[in-house]
Image (cartoon, rainbow, N blue to C red):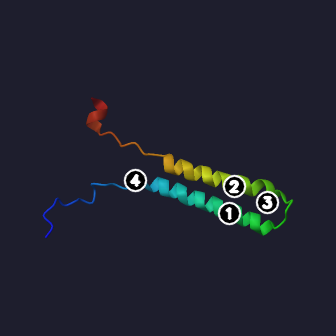
Amino acid sequence: MATGKQRKANDNPMFFSAFNYKLIGIAILLIVSGFTAMYLENEIDGVISLYVSPLVILAGYVVVIFAIMKHDRPQESDSEATA
């Protein structure tokens, strides 16, 4: 039998918040849409495949980096804010 300390569900909160997961979802959507647009144009010298799609893909990667680096600050309680 385990006689050690029981861990509560709130001892280790999730590292990312819901906002971070939404940003990662948006970034994945940007990356996939960039590659899809590049595939659909199917021209070597096309404007979309040379200029637009790489910028959309790059924007997706920037959003992923931002979503990983973004850390929500813990909210202060009212007693700490007034003191």
Side of 8 where 30 appears, left or right: right
Q: Which residue shows up at 71% across the image and 66% down it?
A: 36
Q: What is the number of the mark on residue 49?
A: 3
Q: Badges 1 and 2: C-beta atoms under 8 Å apart? A: yes
- Which amino acid type is shown beneath numbered disc 4? Phe
Structural distance between the alpha carbons of marks 4 and 2: 27 Å
Q: Nearer the viewer, residue 18 or 64?
A: 64
Question: Reading the chain from its start, which is encountered first: label 1 or label 4?
Answer: 4
Q: Residue 41 at what x, y percent from top left?
A: 80, 66
- Which amino acid type is shown beneath numbered disc 2? Val
Please tell me whether mark 3 or mark 1 is closer to you in this view. Answer: 3
Q: Quadrant of the C terminus?
A: top left
Element at label 1: helix
- Which amino acid type is shown beneath numbered disc 3? Ser
Structural distance between the alpha carbons of marks 1 and 2: 8 Å
Q: Which residue shows up at 52% across the image and 51% down it?
A: 67
Element at label 2: helix
Side of 12 where 1 appears, left or right: left
Question: Reading the chain from its start, which is encountered first: label 1 or label 2?
Answer: 1
How would you rate the neighbour count of disc 2 (Cα within 10 Å): few for under 14, some for 14-19, many for 20 or more? many
Question: Reading the chain from its start, which is encountered first: label 4 or label 3?
Answer: 4
To which residue does mark 1 refer?
33
How would you rate the neighbour count of disc 4 (Cα within 10 Å): few for under 14, some for 14-19, many for 20 or more? few
Q: Residue 65 at what x, y percent from top left?
A: 55, 49
Please tell me whether mark 1 or mark 4 is closer to you in this view. Answer: 4
To which residue does mark 4 refer?
15
Q: Quadrant of the N terminus?
A: bottom left
Structural distance between the alpha carbons of marks 4 and 3: 36 Å
To which residue does mark 2 refer?
56
